[in-house]
Image: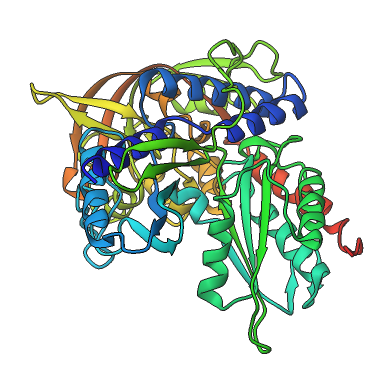
Amino acid sequence: MKKFRESMYTLIVETSTNLPNDVRRAIVKAKEQENAGTTAALALGTISKNISMADYNVSPICQDTGMPTFEIKVPVGANQIEMKKAILDAIEKATKNGNLRPNSVDSLTGENSGNNLGPGTPIIHFEQWEKDEIDVRLILKGGGCENKNIQYSLPTEIEGLGRAGRDLDGIRKCILHSVYQAQGQGCSAGFIGVGIGGDRISSYSLAKEQLFRSVDDVNVNENLRKLEEYVMEHANQLGIGTMGFGGEATLLGCKIGALNRLPASFFVSVAYNCWAFRRLGVTLDSTTGEIKEWLYQDGDKIDFSQDKSEVTNQENKGREVVLQAPITEEQIRDLKVGDVVILNGTIHTGRDAIHHHLVEHDAPIDLNGQVIYHCGPVMLKDENGEWHVKAAGPTTSIREEPYQGDVMKKFGIRAVIGKGGMGPKTLKALQEHGGVYLNAIGGAAQYYADCIKKVEGVDLLEFGIPEAMWHLRVEGFAAIVTMDSHGNSLHADVDKTSLEKLSQFKEKVFK
């Protein structure tokens, strides 16, 4: 199969850069649901623009290209050893060319392999079938949404919903709670796959397998079909909305499967996927390895290039404020939740490794009055040794909650950019120190990369490309104030109101 490696590389590039048609239709439906002029609607406009830019640039839709997971069906007798070698070669090539971010990290040393290869990376599952063709499906599921996966062991007590028993009603409560607990941290509006039964491992595996189903398909199991429809209707009544800003579109797809279980165990597992649902597939000629057909591409491809809506102040009630870094405390104190901030100047990336480092060490540069961006960009170096940004959207901020307030006070940082919001410790620090949290649109890696005009330098590159501190000069970088220096948090407000709405479904028994 001389063409197999080439076909795998093509599949990886397309999956990273080109959303499938069924997902595009779901995003259009979300835009139609959302109320015009709201922050959520503006976020959806930015998402649409980002999809179009990824198409045009053939670059990653989201900078977190996740854990590549392949599900492969092969004819009896196919050489799976050689196929795996070809896939590893294709992964390495895609990483080198900037279509995948180097995401494979040694769990003990923290060292990044640099090529997305290592124990357990990528994930490849083979299955034999009696057809004379090869079916390869790939999902790139980012860490932010992966962290919002959740597993329940029934019976259990669920926040806002009470006791969940070992029946369809208990399953219903688990699934609704899984959407609630994700809030905006998984880059809502999202998709979920649900696995019922099995053991702890097979239940989670089944949940992820459900994400390989088309958004438009209909469950052949009547009970599960009704449950999927129920969840779609009621999850979108929680008011979480796009990015957790509040709104009408919280869930774009729900697919549920079930396995037999042991009498003593009853697991319900939920795999949460962000709006940037990067999942494609191909059928291949079993002799040559050439692509015969693309999967998940039924229907017309929706072109978002004509969508002009984005994060601006044209209809939003919040002010639009232009700031130049470094920023003063007086400028920060003037900002309030809902304001749209347009940043110019230099910002500095900092993720998990950087925050852990800064707690115990001096910063490599003066951060007084500066802006920290929770971002692990996709970077490429040209033939002259200059770095260029291929993708640069925000990562989930809540991971930095143990460090953020202390780091801001220690170094005089005035603004933090990320997604999904932060907790009470950070909110208190914003009040005391005079700081602000700016929510960028998760997954919009091309939109924000376009705002970066120059890479001014990098420090702590020994942590790996995603975790290094990159110094980026930006123009017109738009984000929304969701936590201010006056003790206000949009995230806490949405969490509270969505929990109240979740509680309304406590007694609505599903049959």
Image quarter for residue 373? top left
Q: Residue at x 31, y 39 (%)?
A: 7
Q: Between residues 129 and 504, which one lies in front from this camera angle?
A: 129
Where 332 sits versus 148, above or below? above
Q: Is residue 499 left or right of residue 209?
A: right
Image quarter for residue 338? top right
Q: Between residues 73 and 476, which one lies in front from this camera angle?
A: 73
Where 2 sits versus 478, above or below? below
> What percent of the width, then of the height, locates residue 493?
72, 44
> What percent of the width, then of the height, locates residue 250?
70, 41
> What percent of the width, then of the height, locates residue 333?
55, 28
Q: How many marks?
A: 0
Quadrant (top left, top right, bottom left, bottom right) of the C terminus: bottom right
Image quarter for residue 121? bottom left
Q: Residue at x 65, y 35 (%)?
A: 242
Where 8 sits versus 109, above or below? above
Q: Between residues 199 and 373, which one lies in front from this camera angle?
A: 199
Where 457 sits versus 304, above or below? below
Q: Is residue 216 visible?
A: yes
Q: Is residue 488 visible?
A: no
